[in-house]
Image (spheres, rainbow, N blue to C red):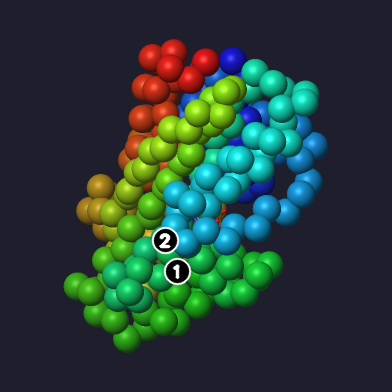
C-alpha cells in the first residue's frame, strides 16, 4: 500500500516516516506536486482536508490506489487566547523564517509568569482512502512556553515548548527523535491512523 504524505514540511515528513515505518510513504516531492495549496479553512481539520483533497486529486492519474494523509498542526498558547493556532506556520507573516515565529511568541509571552504559560501542540489528520473515503484523527501534547529557546532537534516551535511529560525540564527540541515520537501530538494522531489502516478499512 502506498501512502502519500500531503505535506511539504520536512520535519513532519521525517516524523510521519519514523512513526509509520511499516508503510511505503511518498512525499509531495516524490510525486512532483509543486502547487501551493491555499489553506483557507477555519480549523485544523478543515485545512487538513483541503490539503488531502488537493493531493488526492493530483495523484489519481499516477497513483490511483494510493491513500493520502494530510497533517495540519500548530501551537495553541493559553495566554494568547489559543494563538498562533491555525496560523502557526505564518504567525510572523507569510514566508517569515521559523526563528521569527519563535521570537514573536517569546516577545508576546515576555511578561507572563510561569504559572500562566500553558500551551499545547495540536495535530489534526485527514486520511483519504483510494475511493476518497475520509477518516480523521487528532492528537495533543501538553506543555508550557519557555522563557528562551533551547535545543536543536525537531522543528518549528519545538525549542520553546517545555514538555509536560518530561516535567517541563526539557524542550521538545532537547528530546531525541525517539523521545518526541513517543509522546508527540503527531504520534497520538498517527496511532489512530495506524489502527484504522491495520483494520483494512481504507484499502
Ligand atoms: P501547517 O503546515 O499549516 O500545518 O503548519 C504547522 C506549523 O505549526 C509548522 O510550520 C510549525 O511551525 C508548527 N508545528 C506543527 N507541528 C509542530 C511540531 O511538532 N513541533 C513544532 N512546531 C510544530
Residue nearest the observer in this picture, 47 or 193:
47
The residue to which callout 2 is attached is: 75
Vertical relation: 175 (above or below) 151: above
Residue nearest the observer in this picture, 49 or 19:
49
The outermost residue toward the bottom is 111
Q: Residue at x 38, y 55 (%)?
A: 121
The residue to which callout 1 is attached is: 84
Secondary structure of residue under mark 2: strand
Would you say the beta carbon of the disc 2 residue lies within 8 angstroms of ligand 1?
yes
125 relative position to 100: left or right: left
Q: Measured from the top left, where is residue 86 in percent x and y?
A: 47, 62
Asked whether the beta carbons under mark 1 and mark 2 sit within 8 Å of each other, the answer is: yes
Would you say the beta carbon of the disc 1 residue lies within 8 angstroms of ligand 1?
yes
Q: Is residue 145 visible?
A: no
For marks 1 and 2, give the CA distance. 6 Å
How many circles with numbers are drawn on the protein?
2
Q: Please identify the quadrant where the N terminus is shown.
A: top right
Q: Residue at x 39, y 23 (%)?
A: 196
N-term-proximal mark, 1 vs 2: 2
Secondary structure of residue under mark 1: loop
Can you tell which mark lies on residue 142?
A: none
Q: Residue at x 45, y 74 (%)?
A: 105
Q: Residues within 10 Å of mark 2 (few under 14, many from 20)?
A: many
Amino acid at each position: 500500500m502506498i501512502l502519500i504524505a500531503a505535506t511539504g514540511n520536512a520535519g513532519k515528513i521525517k516524523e510521519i516516516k519514523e512513526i509509520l515505518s511499516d508503510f511505503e510513504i511518498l512525499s509531495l516531492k516524490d510525486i512532483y506536486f509543486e502547487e501551493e495549496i491555499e489553506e483557507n479553512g477555519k480549523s485544523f481539520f478543515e485545512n487538513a482536508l483541503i490539503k488531502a483533497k488537493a493531493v488526492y486529486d493530483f495523484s489519481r492519474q499516477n497513483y490511483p490506489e494510493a491513500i493520502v494523509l494530510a497533517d495540519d498542526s500548530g501551537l495553541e498558547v493559553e495566554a494568547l487566547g489559543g494563538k498562533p493556532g491555525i496560523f502557526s506556520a505564518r504567525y510572523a507573516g507569510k514566508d517569515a523564517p521559523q526563528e521569527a515565529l519563535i521570537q514573536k511568541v517569546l516577545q508576546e509571552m515576555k511578561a507572563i509568569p510561569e504559572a500562566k504559560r500553558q500551551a499545547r501542540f495540536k495535530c489534526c489528520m485527514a486520511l483519504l482512502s483510494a475511493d476518497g473515503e475520509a477518516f480523521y484523527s487528532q492528537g495533543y501534547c501538553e506543555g508550557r512556553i519557555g522563557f528562551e529557546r533551547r535545543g536543536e532537534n525537531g522543528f518549528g516551535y519545538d525549542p520553546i515548548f517545555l514538555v509536560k511529560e518530561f516535567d517541563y525540564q526539557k524542550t521538545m527540541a532537547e528530546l531525541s527523535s525517539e523521545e518526541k515520537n513517543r509522546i508527540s501530538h503527531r504520534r497520538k494522531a498517527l496511532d489512530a491512523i495506524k489502527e484504522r489502516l491495520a483494520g483494512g478499512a481504507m484499502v
